[in-house]
Each structure stands twice: as structure tokens, then as C-alpha cells.
Amino acid sequence: MKPFTALRSSLPLAGAAVTALLASCSSTPPLPPVAEAEVTQPVLTAAAAHSAPARAGARAQPSNAATPRAYRADAATHIYGLNRERIWKGRLPPMLYAVGVLQVEVDRNGDVRKLDWMRAPKHAPEVVAEIERTVRAAAPFPVPARMGKVVYTDTWLWHKSGRFQLDTLTEGQD
């Protein structure tokens, strides 16, 4: 009876060791634990309040893209550069909070002239508003030097934590 008791008391320790070993084998670092309140309520404006004034008057590098599809990569890179802390690192989980397809018109100066939702996540109006705010705050965009102005479309892949990826630069989804 004594050996069985000793085995039972060491199982939790063995389980913790196996869990630690498996966690260390992950190709992407695990995300920090998130409180339940943060999981159910999207984080939308964590960096928004102080990011726009710092960019006031700044001009992005010109884009040499000849097509809207090529410009889309420059625009996505520009948005990622301004929102590093909000980008989901690694592959996205299988279930996302929202997916939206947004068409953006950028004029010859890199300013946003028009936003047009091709597919808005209507179940998440707060995400629609935050994506629009993020795009407008990212202006000026790279100047579409070879096209004069450009209308490009990208898909926003939004996690419930408020972090996102753009389809143009996505790392995939599980």
C-alpha cells in the first residue's frame, strides 16, 4: 500500500514536468495568461490614445508599386510598423472574433480619402470602428508615386484580444 501512495503523490509533480517540457518545445512563444475579463471584452484602443499625435506631420516613404495589389503590401507593412504591439505574432487560432474586408482609397499625398466595407463584421461594431480609426491614424500612407492615387483592399483578421493580422502579411491560421 505504501508504494501506491508514494506514486499517487508524485503524479502532480510529473504532470507539471511534462507540461513544462511540452511548453518549451513550442515553435512560437506562448502568450501571457489573459484574465477572463480581457478575453470576453476586446482590447481596442490600448495604444490608440497616444500613437496618433506622435506621427502628426510625418510622411511615409513613397511606394513604387504599379498595381493596387502591389501597393497593398506597402500599406500593410506601413500599418504593421505603426501598430507593432497590436499585431498577433505567429499563426492565428482557428476561431477569430471578427473578419472584415476593407477597401481604402489613398490619394496622391498618401492621405486616406475613403473607406468602404466590402464585408464588415456586423456582429462586432466596435471592431469596425477600431479598424477605421487605425487606418485613419496610419495616414499618411506611402505615396502611390506610380499610380497617382490607389484603391486597395485588405482583409483584417481580428482576435478577441484586440490583436490582428492583415491577410496580406498573415502568418496563417491553425
Image: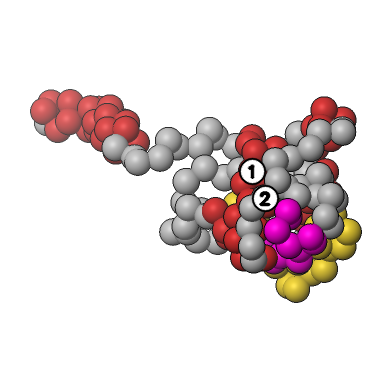
Amino acid identity at mark 1: Tyr
Label 2 sits on residue: 63
Distance from the alpha carbon under mark 1 to that under mark 2: 16 Å
In depth, the one of 87 and 140 nearer the eye is 140
As for residue 126 lying within the magenta part, the answer is no
Q: Is mark 1 on a helix, strand or loop?
A: helix
Residue at (50% x, 37% y) in the render? 31
Q: Can residue 40 be seen in this view?
A: no
Q: Residues within 10 Å of mark 2 (few under 14, many from 20)?
A: some
**152 up-or-down from 137: above or below:** below
Report crowding for label 1: few under 14, some 14 to 19, many 20 or more residues within 10 A (C-alpha): some
Residue 87 pos. (x, y %): 61, 43
In the rendered structure, the answer to whether residue 150 lies left or right of residue 57 reads: left
Which residues are drawn in magenta?
A: 144-157
Q: Which residue is drawn at 44% across and 59% down?
A: 174
Instruction: Classify the position of the N terminus by image quarter.
Output: top left
Q: Which of marks 1 and 2 is nearer the N terminus?
A: 2
What residue is shown at x 64% (from left), y 35% (from top)?
85
Q: Can residue 147 be seen in this view?
A: yes
Kindly indicate the quadrant of the structure image that contains residue 12: top left
Q: Which of 115 and 4 is in front in this view?
A: 115
Where disc 2 sits, the SS reads loop
In this view, the residue in front, 123 or 90, is 90
What kind of colouring is applied to the model shown?
A: secondary structure
Of 96 and 70, which appears nearest the observer?
70
**Front: mark 1 or 2:** 2
- Residue 157 position within the rendered picture, expressed as x and y whole percent measured from the top left: 62, 58
At label 2, which amino acid type do we have?
Answer: Ser
Residue 106 spot, x, y in % from top left: 80, 58
Identify the residue position indicated by label 1 in the image.
Answer: 80
Q: In this view, does 85 lie above or below 167?
A: above
Give the image quarter of residue 115: bottom right
